[in-house]
Amino acid sequence: MDKLLIVDDNEDIRKQLKWGIGKEYSLIMAADAREALEVFRRQNPRVVTLDLGLPPQEESSEEGFRCLEEMLQIAPEVKVIVITGSDEKENAVRAVQMGAYDFYQKPIDLNELKVIVKRAFHLQTLEDENRRLQDALEGSESDIKGIIGHCPEMQLVFSTIRKVAASDISVLVFGESGTGKELVARAIHAVSLRCNGPFIPINCGAIPENLLESELFGHEKGAFTGAHTRIQGKVEYAHRGTLFLDEIGELPPSLQVKLLRFLQEKVIQRLGGRENIPVDARIVAATNIDISRAMEEGTFREDLYYRIGVVTITLPPLRKRGDDLMLLANLFLKRFANDYKKRIKVFSPAAREFMTAYSWPGNVRELENKVQRAVLMASSPVIEPDDLGFAGRPAAVKGGTYSEATTLREARDRVERDMIQGAITNNKGNIAKAAEELGISRPTLYDLLKKHGVSV
């Protein structure tokens, strides 16, 4: 139920409200400002009724105004209904001017107050949904909730995420290890109507089979040796949120049956229990195995596949994402350079050729790790192949490293050209931002672009 915080120092009024509206909302009670602010921070109620006359200044209303101000600072979107005495119209107006949602004058009429509270929750719901939709619309075509990509394959991924987010259908994500399957699952959750609920991930291939059932569905006290207390499983924890089943292709056949039952009936039974527990959770699953072959071999149930794969999303490997490789590399470079406070701006031409020629079996995760290593290892503002850990591999280019320059001027020109090219790439061709990153004026940058033949 929706949480409603009632702040009033009068115990009789608190009892009256608990009796009158306690069945409709999850009530939280507080008798003074200190207690109210403490539970407000901890419980995060969406609507509050606040009596302005709070101790120790019941007569002045200042304690109530202080409480209102702090609540609005903590959560500006909260709906606070101020309750005042019949002769305190000025205080009510002041409270609304401060940001209170509405006011109500004593004596309390439960029917009238119910209407105001219900309207406040309804408005809060509309505003929450509007914020979610706005967030979804603000995601650009090349960036959605932390996933970056320009290539057509990634654009299709973004489009599918946006289409399925508002529904509750199950989604199955295919992709090699390191392509970002969990990121896709988190993005679906983040732009869905369940975004305020929990996101619960579990790796089906990382937990021993004898423990996985308990991890997923929980267990009752005494269900097995060592089960000293009742434990909720991941499925229960995902109630009103999203359950992400990573590496679902590794799920044992016995648990595939139990998962299928949950998907069909939306109820579970804990290990060792007989009670049917209803759970409202959306399923997003992922795998890097060939599900079609697994079904042919009988290791994965077809009926389960049709349940979890209502919509499928296939993530391309990094080696097939074209220019996304250097786009991601430069983003990682900028992030780790900031994290480690190092003045590293660009990859050398040789480093770029090594990176584009490499197959990246670990995909985006491997790229991130290599760039992090390079930032730590680099001893100059430019990253070389050795910094990335490509030492000992056949040379991809000739004359590409700064150590191979024949003169100091040649080396300086190469550094200058690569830093300019890196700034242009990082800022997507925006001259003003590139000049700011390089610490030079726009006219100077135009001259340098012309000098080095760098195109925008």
Image: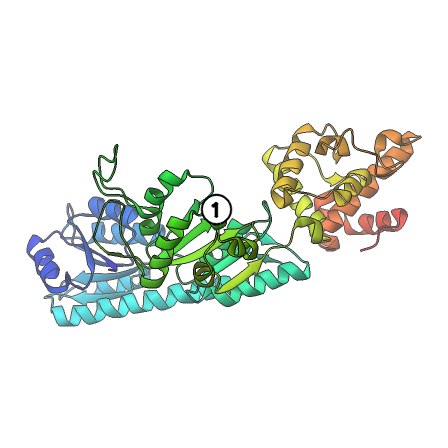
Q: Vertical placement of 72 versus 412: above or below? A: below
Residue found farthest to the right: 406
Quadrant where the N terminus is found in the figure: bottom left
The percent position of residue 417, horizontal first and vertical second, equals 83, 43
360 vs 294, left or right, is: right
Residue found farthest to the left: 12
Of 294 and 88, the residue lying toward us: 294
The percent position of residue 196, horizontal first and vertical second, equals 38, 56
Task: Tell me which corner region of the image, top left, top right, bottom left or bottom right, holds residue 15.
Answer: bottom left
Q: Which residue does the image show at 72% across and 44% down from the upper left?
A: 359
Q: Can residue 68 be seen by looking at this rendering?
A: yes
Residue with the mark numbered 1: 250
Labels in figure, total:
1
Of 31 and 185, the residue lying toward us: 185
Q: Residues within 10 Å of mark 1 (few under 14, many from 20)?
A: some
Q: Can residue 191 be seen by looking at this rendering?
A: no
Instruction: Look at label 1 and name its amino acid.
Output: Glu
Q: Which residue does the image show at 34% across and 66% down from the upper left?
A: 125
Of 213 and 86, the residue lying toward us: 213
Q: Disc 1 on helix, strand or loop?
A: helix
Q: Which residue does the image show at 32% across and 55% down from the upper left?
A: 239
Query: How has the structure been colored for display?
Result: rainbow
405 vs 65, left or right, is: right
